[in-house]
Image: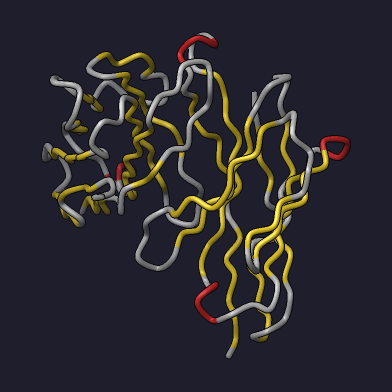
């Protein structure tokens, strides 16, 4: 079966531009996570969806970051008025939620965002 | 707050040597999960193992083995008879509950990774 896919794989934006990053989770996976990975660092949590509900957005660095998952499948991470410090790889992960258990998160290839 | 420390930034070994990657974690949770992921140059994080905090049995999968020691808060990863294809960045991660235990899914706290290079 298909894994998590993300598009675009690479995005170059001029400072101040808005960008939208897409994530297609594994079919049937209830939970979806976004992480940000700076160069040479481990991924850091941004936000979490359970179906269409955004249950945690505590990791979003500023109000310029916005995520949605309107139909409980595909998710979009939007960054408004991009800044150079937003340059990073944005990783999406999905998992099949098992009630009361921590399930394994499967990651996509990421979108490398470069803000000039 | 939860924390994962991977003190080894980079390791290089000659092919066929054994190599151990260290992971030390901090948490106040009594129930937690530990993970290892591999990140090859392509960038995708590849899941390797998940371990429940109540299960301290070591695990072996082919050339890979994991040593979980709750007493020292460590979850080390050993590759036996390393191969060039093992070259990658390896991340250790710890689960953290999101807003209540009934959600069933938890965000991951990652270490900074260990870059492993296998020299042919």
User: Toward the viewer: B10 or B99?
Assistant: B99
Q: Considering the image in quadrants, where does the C terminus of chain B appear?
A: bottom right
Relative to A13, is B85 on the left or the right? right
User: Toward the viewer: B6 or B67?
Assistant: B67
Is residue B91 placed above or below A97 in the rendered structure?
A: below
User: Toward the viewer: A97 or A32?
Assistant: A97
User: Which x, y percent locates residue B49?
Assistant: 58, 48
- Tell me the quarter of the picture where residue A19 sits: top left
Is residue A42 placed above or below B38 in the rendered structure?
A: above
User: Which x, y percent locates residue A94?
Assistant: 34, 35
Relative to B98, is B15 on the left or the right? right
In the image, what residue occupies the spot 45% across and 22% down?
A98
Relative to A30, is B71 on the left or the right? right
Is residue B62 placed above or below B103 in the rendered structure?
A: below
Number of numbered discs overlaid on the protein picture = 0
Relative to A19, is A56 on the left or the right? right
In the image, what residue occupies the spot 19% across and 28% down?
A73
């Amino acid at each position: 079966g298909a894994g998590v896919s993300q598009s675009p794989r690479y995005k170059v934006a001029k400072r101040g531009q808005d960008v939208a990053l897409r994530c297609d989770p594994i079919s049937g996976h209830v939970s979806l996570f976004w992480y940000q990975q700076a160069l040479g660092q481990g991924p850091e949590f941004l936000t979490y969806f359970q179906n269409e509900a955004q249950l945690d957005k505590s990791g979003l660095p500023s109000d310029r970051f916005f995520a949605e998952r309107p139909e409980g499948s595909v998710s979009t991470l939007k960054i408004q008025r991009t800044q150079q410090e937003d340059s990073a790889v944005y990783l999406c992960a999905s998992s099949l939620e098992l009630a009361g258990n921590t399930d394994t998160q499967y990651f996509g290839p990421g979108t490398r965002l470069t803000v000039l | 707050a939860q924390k994962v420390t991977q003190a080894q930034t980079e390791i290089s070994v000659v092919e066929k040597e054994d190599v151990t990657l260290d992971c030390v974690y901090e948490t106040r949770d009594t129930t937690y999960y530990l993970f290892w992921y591999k990140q090859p140059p392509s960038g995708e994080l590849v899941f390797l193992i998940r371990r429940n905090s109540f299960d301290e049995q070591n695990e072996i999968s082919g050339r890979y083995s994991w040593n979980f020691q709750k007493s020292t808060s460590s979850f080390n990863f050993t590759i036996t008879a390393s191969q060039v294809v093992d070259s990658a960045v390896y991340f250790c991660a710890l689960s953290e509950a999101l807003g209540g235990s009934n959600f069933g899914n938890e965000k991951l706290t990652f270490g900074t990774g260990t870059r492993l290079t296998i020299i042919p």
